[in-house]
Image (cartoon, rainbow, N blue to C red):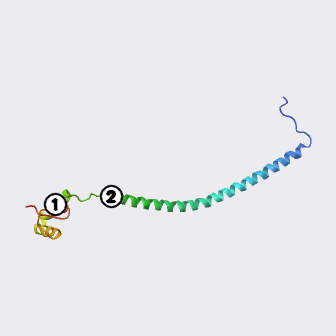
Amino acid sequence: MGDFLPPLPGHAAAASSTAAAAAAEHERLRRRFDRYRQLHASRQQQYDSFASGVYNQQAHETQLLHRRWQDSKKPTTTASSAAAKCAGSSARMPGAAARAGDALTGSAGPTTAGNAATVCRPTV
């Protein structure tokens, strides 16, 4: 029953000053949050422009790395693949392959493992 006491005389002025203080505090907080919102809006535009530049740079670097990776995966010329290429070229132009082989090695002798990738000999 004694939970709520009636206000004491002279406290009515204190209640009105408390309401004024609360209103002043509310206004101060409102201005403060408005400044935060304005700063956030201006920083958001700066962030967006900066982020798009970073994303473009990362995409370009990714393309370069992908191209380098693809270049590293290209097959290297081996003796067997060179022989297969030479077999295809000698079938089209039999005399040209023999002349090219003689010009490269300086002789018409048999091919060795060292010059197999550069010399095409016609198959007889």
Q: Is the residue 101 above or below the residue 39 in the image?
A: below
- Quarter of the image with the N terminus in it: top right
**How many numbered callouts?**
2
Quarter of the image where one finds residue 66? bottom left
Q: Earlier in the sequence, mark 1 or mark 2?
A: 2
SS type, badge 2? helix
Residue at which label 1 appears: 112
Q: Residue at x 42, y 58 (%)?
A: 62
**Identity, as a three-letter code, of the amino acid under mark 2:** Ser
- Answer few, some or many: residues within 10 Å of disc 2's Cα (few below 14, many 20 plus, some between 14 and 19): few
Q: Which residue is mark 2?
A: 72
Left/right of residue 122 with respect to residue 44 in the rendered view:
left
Q: Residue at x 16, y 68 (%)?
A: 105
Question: Can you tell which of label 1 and label 2 is closer to the viewer?
Answer: 1
- Give the answer, above or below, for where 115 lies relative to 28: below
Q: Position of residue 77 (x, y in %)?
A: 24, 59
